[in-house]
Structure formats: structure tokens, C-alpha cells
Amino acid sequence: MNLLLKNLIACSCFFLISQTLALEFDVNTDQIIEANKNSNEWLTHGRTYSEQRYSSLNQINSDNIKNLNIEWFYDLDSSRGHEATPLVIDGIMFTTGAWSVVYANNAVTGELLWKYDPKVPREKAYYLCCDAVNRGVAAWQGKVFVGTLDGRLIALDAKDGSVVWETMTVDSFEAYSITGAPRVIKGKVIIGNGGAEFGVRGYVSAYDVNNGNMLWRFFTVPGNPENGFENAAMEMAAETWKGSEWWKFGGGGTVWDSMAYDPDLDILYIGTGNGSPWNYKVRSPGGGDNLFLSSIVALKPDTGDYVWHYQTTPGDNWDYTATQHIILADLEIDGKIRKVLMQAPKNGFFYVLDRTNGELLSAENYVKVTWASGIDKETGRPIKTNLGNYEKNAVLLFPGALGGHNWMPMSFNPDTGLVYIPAQELYMPFKKDENYNYDKKGWNTAVDFTVITPPKNLLQLSLLVRSVRGRLSAWDPVEQKEVWKQYLTLPWNGGILSTSGNLVFQGTSDGELVAYDASTGEQKWSKNLQTGIVAAPITYSINGKQYVTVVAGYGGVFALQAGLPPKYSGGPINARIVTFSLDGDIQLPQRPANINMPKPPPPNEDQASIARGEVLYHLECHVCHGAGAMGGGVISDLRYMTKETHEKFEAITLGGLYIEKGMVGFARRLNEQNAEDIHAYLIQRANETYFLETLNSALK
Ligand code: CA
């Protein structure tokens, strides 16, 4: 087909779709409130305001799931960090990729209709704890809203992706970032932000959908008392911060992911993040709960006024955010229908609260927990043990800082009455950083990351890898117990979709999209998608045909730090939107062959330099490039550097030569000797790996 004809067809298709959009694209409160009755579309992040991520579609079900195959796929532009839940409205799929880029595709064919790149400066990567990710858009009356990594909230025209308005939601001089999906309630776009590893003060704000004017802002932690408090809630919160000038650390408590809304009660629920710095003794040496860290806070969506709060981890000391997915449901408990709110935050307990007033109804641990022995039913407070105390000695903490469950969405299925938790069994050593100094634009944990260095001994390393795993847990929230579970090879698996087809869908860290029987947990189907999957799948129906879609791409903090198994050592692969149907018949292209490891330069003989380099590497580099210099498969594995890259090492690490790839220059924190030491360590690691790979291929 000649190009002109092709373009003409593409244009007229687009024109038709644009016309449809202009006529029908009208997502408003009533439609989202009624979203439960409209399973054909996916109108808001968690499908409904209750964020249950359950669909009543059942054309695809546990009897015919074996026929599910790929209907279409669309290649995204980056291998880096894909966590988005797409929306599907009027036949169009709106989703985001890495670096806050927005895509609009035809939901039936996958054809790209438009793409919008907010051109986030790549220097921003230095101020991100957890990869260049974005979890999706919101939509409202012809507009699509995205929050960007550099803190902007942008309204796009849904027809063509052009900018309608744009507003900066943060102080650009501070290390704020946005990775979460906005929600729209009654004409207000609600958005929070991240940055609690970098010493910021958390908040959530509401903006007018029509012009981007800010309507209200609710801070989650108090600021300097000398400046006065914004409201009575902040005055109350300030009573719980003690000793030192705690406000100078920023405080944290960022609202970086979960929200839910109850239209009957007219209450917005937000989850808040960890303390900044992590170390409680540094942050608030005089004690106190440090409100509203690690809390669920109920607000009035019209004004941002405080209604109630429940703090999951008073005096957070371990990065135990309560930003994890919040689900609203009505459950029968002790013979009464209760309006509940459910959350499985990082700290390892599954909470059921009365969402009218924040009262604790029940809480039990869903994974192994050492920092507390339980939650006191009377006071609603954790019963802390001494096993989480790292003030004097290092401790091995369960769950670790990545949580028993992280941001990956759960799902509540009203047919089975179960909540499906993408849980993980992942511990972490905690040690106090004896040399901590507050750095306004650096990592502020006051925790010593050098203890994360993995063992060099291969046997110990393989035992370590086998001692962590993922766990898909089907949880009965009324009985507070696990009904079935599936162990997964690695931690950091995808979010969940459940359907009335008696199915539970989840992608895995090692690249499979899997469907289980929702009642029994029996695996019914799986498909290898060539890349780790962390996002949650969705489902929708167009012209009577049901589809399942997942943004297949790896990323996020675990993926960077400790990522994929060796079978993917071929290097990063770009993410894809992959859509399935019962009569799909598309094959994915062959995955590129594994890279042969380039012969590294000879090891440096200066052992002291290598040792210094190992410490520096784990202080400055490992969060992105992987513990022990073992890349997670999202960005470059530094053991595989080519001769040319080795030659440019200093220009890259200090001079910022690869800034466009998101690799900032570290001259602000490292000198030439430091760079040389890190290089010596990497060459050492490359030689160790090269030896093993050569041995392996010789034995084959
Ligand atoms: Ca955190």
C-alpha cells in the first residue's frame, strides 16, 4: 500500500474516532458513580471510586480461558518503569509509559491515535526513589489528566492530546515528583506527590478541571510551628512530633498513590507515606506518633477539610508507607452490613476499618511480621516488639522497606468475598547510619544501605535469592484469614484484576501473565510476555467482545535493585501494551538473543580501591543499577559495559554524558577518586561474572 493511501486511511479513521469522541466522550461524576453498572468501560484508576478493580464481565471465564490469546500489542518507547492502569472510554485506551508520556490507542485495534510527551528533564532521575514511573491518567468531560515526574499536572484534550492547561503543583527547588494517577471528583482533579526519601513535606491538592486553578491543599505533616499552622488538624499533628527541629527534615508523609471516594458519605480517602528521614530517632528524638505519617486520612473533597485518620504505623521507623491500595466495600460483619475500608500497607497487616469514622474493625498479618506482635483491638495500635529497633544493633526486619505488599493494586471480588493481595515475602537488614547528615536534595533515610551488599559467595547468594519470593494471597477480609495462596518465584509481581468470570489475573516479575480460578486458586492459563510485569490488568468490552489488557513492562525500585532472573540477561526490553481476546491469534516477535558479555578490562590490583568502590557503589548507585552491580533488567547492567563505555566512565558518572538516558552526573557528590574506586569495583564484578559465564558456556 502506498504511503499516501495509508495516511489517508489513518487520517479518516482518526477523523471518525475524533467525531465519536467529541460526541460521546463525557466522563462525569454520575458516570463514574455509576461505573459499577458500566463494565464495558474502565472510567477511573480503580475502575470505580471504590477502587475494587472487579469487573462483572464474564464472556472470558474459567471455562474458556484456555482460548485467550493476543488480539493486538503496541510497543512503547522505553524499557524503564511501567506501572500504569489504562482507562478505556468510548473505544479509546488512555495510558502512560515511562517519563510520564501519555498514549491514546484505539482499544479495538491498538492503533496509536496520539501521544503526548511532557518532556520531563532527565536530570529528574536523580530525585526519584523508585524509577521514572507513572501509574496512569484520569479523564473528565473531554479531558485527560496526567501528573508528571517533575511535579506538573497537565490537562490534555482527549481528541488530539493537545495541552488545555498545565500547572506546577510543587516547589521545583524541592525533590518532589508525581508518579500516581490523579482522580477527578465533582470537577476537581485530586493529586498528591512523592519524595519522602528526599526530605519533602507531603500534601494532596485539588485543582479545577476547567482551568487548573488550585482549590485546596491538605498537608499531611506539620511545618515549622513559628509560621503558624494551616488548620486545626496540623496543630493536632504537631503535638506528635518531638525533640529537635523536626520540621527541617521535611517530614515526609507523601500522598504518592492510593485514593478512594465514597459518594454517599462524600468522603475522599488518601493513604500517606513514610517519615523523612526513615530513622525515627533522628526525625523525632523526643518520641510521638508523628501524625499523619503512614496513615489513612479522610477528607471532604470540596474543601480538603480533615474528617478522621487512622495511623497504621505510629512512629514509622522503616519506610512503612500506608499509600498502598485502598478498597471500599460493604461487608457483613457479625450480622451487620458495615461500610468498610481495606488496606494491606507495607507493614504486613491487613486492616478493615469502618470508613464512616475510622474505627478499627480488625487487623491481622498477611505476611511474616517481626516489628509488631499484633494490633490491639481496643486502642487500634500496633503492639511493637524490640525486633524492629536498630538504634544500637542492625536487625533483619520482616517485612522489609519494600513491604509485604507495595503499590501494586489488589482486587476485591464480591462474588467470592475475597481480596487478592499481590504480597511478597521480602525482608531487609536495617542498620542506623552513624554518619547521617541532612542533605536537602539527597537521600534522607539515616539508614545504612551498605548492609544490603549481597554475599559474594555463590552458595550464599543462591540461598538469599531463594529465601525471598512473591505470594498471591486470596484473603477473606471478614474472617481475616488466607483462603488460598500461590507462591511466585520472585517478589515484586503485578497488580490484580478479578472478574465475575471467576478469574483472577496477575502478571509476574518473571514475565508471565497468569489467570487463576478466583475461588480455588488453581492456575487456569498463562502467557509469557517477555518482560517482567508489575502493572495491573484491566478488562473492557466493545461491540459485545471482551478484552483483557496489561501494560507489560518492568520497573520500580525492586526491579532496579534486584530484578530479573538470569534467563533475561539479554538486557532491557521495551514495554508493550498487550491486549487479549478469546479469538486473538497474534504472536509476539522473537525476543532479541541474549547479549554475549564483552570481555572486561583486567581487574584493578588496588584492593583498597575496590573495597572503597563497593561501599560508594552501594551508597550512590545500587538503587538504580542493582545490589552487587547485578542489573535488574530495566536499565543497563554495569557488568556488561563495553570497552567504549569503560573509556567514557568518568565522563558519564561525573560529567553527565548520558543525561538523556536519565543518568545524571554525580560531580556534586563524587570526586575523581570516588569515580575511580567505583569503576574498580565494577571491573572486579564484571571479571567475576565473565569468569562464570565463560565457565558456563564451556560446560554446555
Ligand atoms: Ca518510601
Image: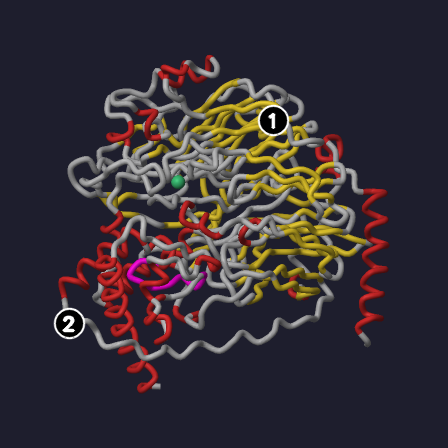
Question: Magenta stretch mostly in which secondary structure?
Answer: loop
Disc 1 secondary structure class: strand
**For residue 433, which numbered disc appears in the image?**
none
* Residue underneath mark 1: 214
Relative horizontal placement of residue 180, taking residue 349 as reference (left or right): right
Q: Nearer the viewer, residue 597 or 469?
A: 597
Above-or-below relation of 43 to 540? above
Q: Amino acid at mark 1?
A: Met
Separation (CA) of disc 2 from disc 1: 59 Å
* Quarter occupied by residue 698: bottom left
Disc 2 secondary structure class: loop
**Residue 518 appearing in the image:** no
Near mark 1 (Cα within 10 A), the count class, few <14, some 14-19 or many ≥20, is some
Relative horizontal placement of residue 646, taking residue 3 as reference (left or right): left
Residue name at image x 56 percent, y 35 percent: 168
Q: Nearer the viewer, residue 429 or 222?
A: 222
Q: Position of residue 453 (x, y in %)?
A: 25, 56
The N terminus: image quadrant: bottom right
* Residue underneath mark 2: 605
Residue name at image x 45 percent, y 56 percent: 662
